[in-house]
Image (tube, rainbow, N blue to C red):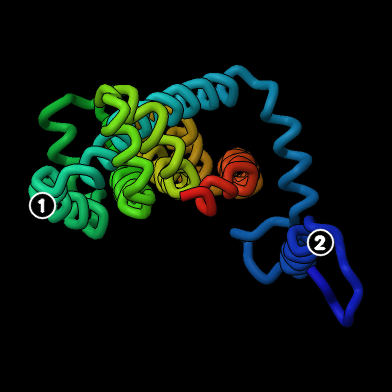
């Protein structure tokens, strides 16, 4: 970031917003926005408690499980849609519908079908993440140079060999982009699931702190959640940049 021709460190914008948060909190403008310094102090107070660690484990378990299923199902499905016109015509309308539909409305249906436990939360997380992964994998396959596919066919490549050596690697930049966006959506999915389906994990802490007007605790948990999502997103963005040369080789 540059200001008046001076290059500032990459985290300067976060420091600026943190300073603004501190000023607004110290001004007493709103009870619901405590100073950032108080939020950080509260975070260090609760981070070692059994309740916080249990909530972190439950949220991480649901999040990682949902993202895992979204990736394992979404990437092969997107690749199949990109390489097979019939499958693409059958699935693409549904993928677009679920991507644009308010998935929160499906939560009561999931509760009826799968109960009020962790299974429904994991499925909710998967549904929030999977559709953009499918579309990006499909887009990556559709941009592959056809000569690569013809070469694999002429050398008698099996479907698995074509998938693992041609389609996956050539579409990798788009796949990583879809996974990065899907993970961001999965964060929203896991919290919605924990708030609406079963009050566990961070969802239970949000409910507890908001009902008791413990805003410093509320924002402390929210900061942890945002920090985890931001770290994962930036790591995947770094991987995208590392494999971007595949796009030129297509």
Disc 2 crowd, CA 10 A, few/some/many (<14, 14-19, 20+): few
Q: How far from the left and from the top, in percent, is residue 12?
A: 81, 61
As measured in the structure, the alpha-carbon distance from the residue carrying label 1 to the one carrying label 2 is 46 Å
Residue plotted at (37% across, 42% down): 148
Q: How far from the left and from the top, in percent, is residue 241?
A: 63, 48
User: Which residue ends up furthest to the front in the rendered image?
Assistant: 154
Q: Is residue 111 left or right of residue 155?
A: left
Q: What is the secondary structure assignment of the residue under circle 1?
A: helix
Residue plotted at (56% across, 22% down): 51
Please give the residue where the numbered disc 1 appears in the rendered image: 89
Q: How far from the left and from the top, in percent, is residue 184?
A: 47, 47
Figure check: 56 above or below 96: above
The quadrant in which residue 170 appears is: top left
Q: In this view, does 200 lie to the left or right of 214?
A: left
Residue plotted at (58% across, 43% down): 243
Q: What is the secondary structure assignment of the residue under circle 2?
A: helix
Q: How many marks?
A: 2
The quadrant in which residue 152 appears is: top left
Q: In this view, does 103 lie to the left or right of 65?
A: left
Q: Which of 236 and 79 is in front in this view?
A: 79
Please give the residue where the numbered disc 2 appears in the rendered image: 12
Q: Which of 131 and 80 is in front in this view?
A: 80
């Amino acid at each position: 970031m540059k200001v008046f021709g001076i290059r500032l460190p990459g985290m300067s914008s976060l420091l600026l917003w943190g300073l603004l948060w501190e000023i607004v909190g110290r001004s007493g403008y709103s009870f619901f926005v405590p100073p950032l310094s108080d939020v950080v102090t509260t975070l260090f107070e609760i981070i070692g408690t059994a309740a916080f660690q249990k909530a972190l484990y439950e949220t991480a378990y649901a999040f990682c499980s949902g993202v895992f299923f979204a990736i394992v199902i979404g990437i092969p499905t997107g690749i199949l849609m990109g390489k097979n016109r019939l499958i693409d015509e059958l699935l693409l309308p549904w993928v677009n519908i679920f991507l644009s539909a308010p998935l929160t409305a499906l939560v009561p249906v999931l509760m009826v079908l799968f109960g009020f436990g962790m299974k429904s939360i994991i499925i909710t997380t998967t549904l929030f993440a999977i559709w953009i992964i499918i579309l990006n994998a499909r887009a990556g396959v559709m941009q592959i140079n056809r000569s690569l596919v013809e070469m694999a066919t002429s050398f008698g490549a099996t479907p698995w060999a074509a998938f693992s050596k041609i389609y996956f690697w050539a579409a990798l930049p788009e796949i990583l982009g879809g996974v990065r966006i899907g993970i961001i959506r999965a964060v929203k999915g896991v919290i919605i699931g924990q708030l609406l389906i079963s009050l566990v994990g961070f969802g239970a802490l949000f409910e507890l702190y908001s009902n008791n007007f413990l805003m410093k605790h509320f924002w402390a948990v929210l900061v942890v959640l945002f920090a985890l999502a931001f770290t994962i997103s930036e790591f995947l963005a770094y991987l995208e940049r590392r494999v971007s040369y595949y796009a030129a080789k297509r």
